[in-house]
Amino acid sequence: MKLSLIVPCFNEQDSLPAFYREVTAVLATVAYDYEILLIDDGSADQTLAVIKDLAEKDERVKYLSFSRNFGKEAAMYAGFCNVTGDYVAVMDADLQDPPALLPRMLQLLESGEYDSVATRRVTRKGEPPIRSFFARKFYQIINRISDVDIVDGARDFRLMRRKMVDAIVSIRESNRFSKGIFGWIGFKTYWMPYENVERVAGESKWNFWKLLKYAIDGIINFSGMPLAIASWGGMIMTLLSFLSLIFLVVRDLIFSNPVAGWASTVCIIIFIGGIQLFCLGIMGQYIARTYIETKRRPLYIVSESNVNPDNDVRRNDADK
Ligand code: UDP
Ligand code: MG
C-alpha cells in the first residue's frame, strides 16, 4: 500500500523545511511506502528552490510548479490528478494540519469501515474573533440552503481511498469549492476533531475579502437558493404593488386626492430599481460561472515538474 501526500505551497519557503522534517519523522513510524507531492502554486519567494532541494535529497519528494498563482483549489486538483498512492491525503505546508494525526487516520482507513478520514477544528484559537463569527455564519447558511453537508470547522486535511480521489478528479468544474465537492461525492467519512494549531512560519494567505469571495463561490456552486430568493422576492413585490394599486384606486374613488406624495413615489421607484439590479446581479453571478465553465480552460498550467506525465489520470480521458 502506498500513501501520497498532496501539499499545496504558496510562498512557504520558511515552513517547508519544518514540514518536511516533521512529516518524514511521522511517516518513518508507519509501514507504508509514500510520496510527497509538493505543488508550488506560483510562489514569489524561494519556495521552488527549497522544493527542488528536498527533491534532490529524497526521491520520494515529487513536485509540480505552476506558471503562476492559480489558487489552493487548483493546486489540490493538480495533486489529485498526479498522485499514485492507494491512500491520498491533502495537507497544508504550514503544519496547521498536524502530521501526528496521520498514523491514527491510516489506522481508521485500514479498519475498512471508512473511505475517508476528515479533520475538523473544534477551536478557532488564534483567529480574529470577527473572522470566526463570519465563518460560523457561513456554515450555518450554506448548510441550510444547499443539499451537500459542509461541516463547520472542516479542514481540507483528509485522508482518502483511491476511489474517492478518482471521483474528485472526475469533477471538472473550474470554479472549485473542495469542501463542497468532498461532501457531494459522498462515501463514508469519519470526522476527527482536533485543536487548532497556528502556522509555523510565514503568514496566512487569506484576508477577509478573499474569504468572502470563497464563501460566495461555495454558496453559488452548491445552491440555487439565491436565485429562488430573487424570484420569490420579485413575486412578493408584485403582489404587494398590486394590492397597493387596488388600495389607491379605491381611495381615489372615495376621497378625490390632489397630486401629492411624489417623494414617496420616488423612494418606491428607487427601491424597486435597487431590488431589480440586485436580482440581476445574482443572475449575473450564475451566468458568469456558466460562461467560465463553458470555456473549459485547464485549471492550472505546469511550468516545471519531476512527476512522470503518465501519472496524470486525465491523460486517458477522451475529452481532456
Ligand atoms: N495556498 C496555495 N495557494 C494559494 C493560497 C494558499 O497553495 O493561493 C496553500 C498554502 O501554501 C498553504 C495552504 O494553501 O499550504 C493553506 O493556506 P493558508 O495557511 O494561508 O490558509 P489558512 O491556514 O490561513 O486557512
Ligand atoms: Mg494555514
Image (spheres, rainbow, N blue to C red):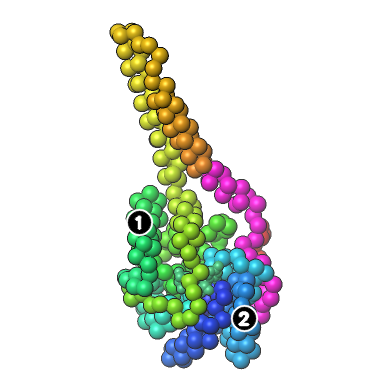
Decide if residue 51 is in sight here.
yes
Residue 235 vs 11, above or below: the answer is above
Mark 2 CB in 8 Å range of ligand 1?
A: no
Q: At 40% across and 14% down in the image, what residue appears?
A: 259
Q: Is residue 31 visible?
A: no
Q: Position of residue 49 (x, y in %)?
A: 64, 83
Q: Is 83 part of what is drawn in magenta?
A: no
Where's the C terminus, which quadrant? bottom right
Residue density around tag 2, few if under 14, some if 14–19, many if 20 or more, within 10 Å: few
Image: 31 above or below 122: below
Mark 1: which amino acid? Lys
Q: From the viewer's perspective, is 34 left or right of 112?
A: right
Q: Position of residue 311 (x, y in %)?
A: 63, 74
12 or 27, nearer to the observer: 12
Question: Mark 1: which secondary structure?
Answer: helix
Residue 46: mark in rendering: 2
Question: Of the numbered discs in the image, which one, if any, rests on residue 137?
Answer: 1
Q: Residue at x 40, y 84 (%)?
A: 100
User: How far is the residue under mark 1 from the one under mark 2?
Assistant: 37 Å
* x then y, percent, for residue 203: 49, 74
Give the residues in magenta: 284-313
Describe the element under mark 2 as helix, strand or loop.
Answer: loop
